[in-house]
Image: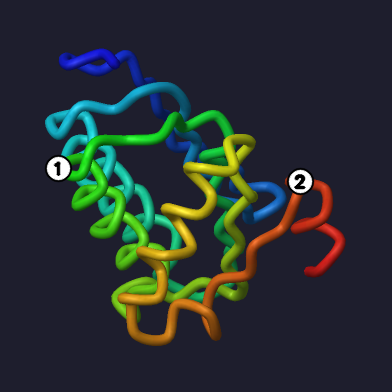
Amino acid sequence: MAINGTGVFSMDIDKESKVFTAFAEGFFSMEQGIAFCEDFTKAALECSKYGDYIMIVDAQGVKPSTPQVAEALGNALALYASDEFKFKKRFMLNCASSITQSQAVRLSKNVPGFNTKVTFVDTKEDALKEI
């Protein structure tokens, strides 16, 4: 397992279709997890001011993480459901790794209101069909 992390992430704000996509994949270090949360917050605040965007989190390629990095994942899940952001709808793609998916589902149970605010879907297309 990579100690320094080999994860990559990006934030995309599509102003035309009003879709905010947070993308992440690979093994994340604690520092990368913190950087992801900071970038997510900045981008989400920018596009969620008026409540007319949908949010899609594409972390399908994220690999299972250490207990320390799982804490950062828990913080990210809390951000996805945060009332600080006004999204029309919120989606998270199911992870390709069953271990990572079960980790995300387990951690999401600790986030108040996560299951009522964020919908797990298989593909980005599935999310777009629901808007």
**Image disc number at residue 123:** 2
Q: Quadrant of residue 24?
A: top left
Q: Nearer the viewer, mark 1 or mark 2?
A: 1
Q: Secondary structure at mark 2?
A: loop
Q: Earlier in the sequence, mark 1 or mark 2?
A: 1
Quadrant housing the N terminus: top left
The percent position of residue 20, horizontal first and vertical second, equals: 54, 50
Vertical placement of residue 5 versus 35, above or below = above
In the rendered image, which quarter is residue 130 located in? bottom right
Count of numbered marks: 2
The residue lying at 78 percent from left, 69 percent from top is 131
Q: Amino acid at mark 1?
A: Gln
Cβ atoms at labels 1 and 2 below 8 Å apart: no
Alpha-carbon span between mark 1 and mark 2: 28 Å
Q: Decide: few, some or many residues near mark 1? Use Cα within 10 Å; few <14, some 14-19, many ≥20.
A: few
The residue sitting at 71% across, 51% down in the picture is 17
Identity of the residue drawn at 14% across and 42% down = 68
* Residue picked out by circle 1: 68
Q: Position of residue 63 (x, y in %)?
A: 44, 29
Q: Is residue 86 left or right of residue 115?
A: left
The residue positioned 55% from the left and 85% from the top of the image is 116
Q: Secondary structure at mark 1?
A: helix
Rate crowding at label 2 as few (under 14), some (14 to 19) or many (20 or more) other CA atoms within 10 Å: some
Q: Is residue 72 left or right of residue 78?
A: left
Res 118 → quadrant? bottom right
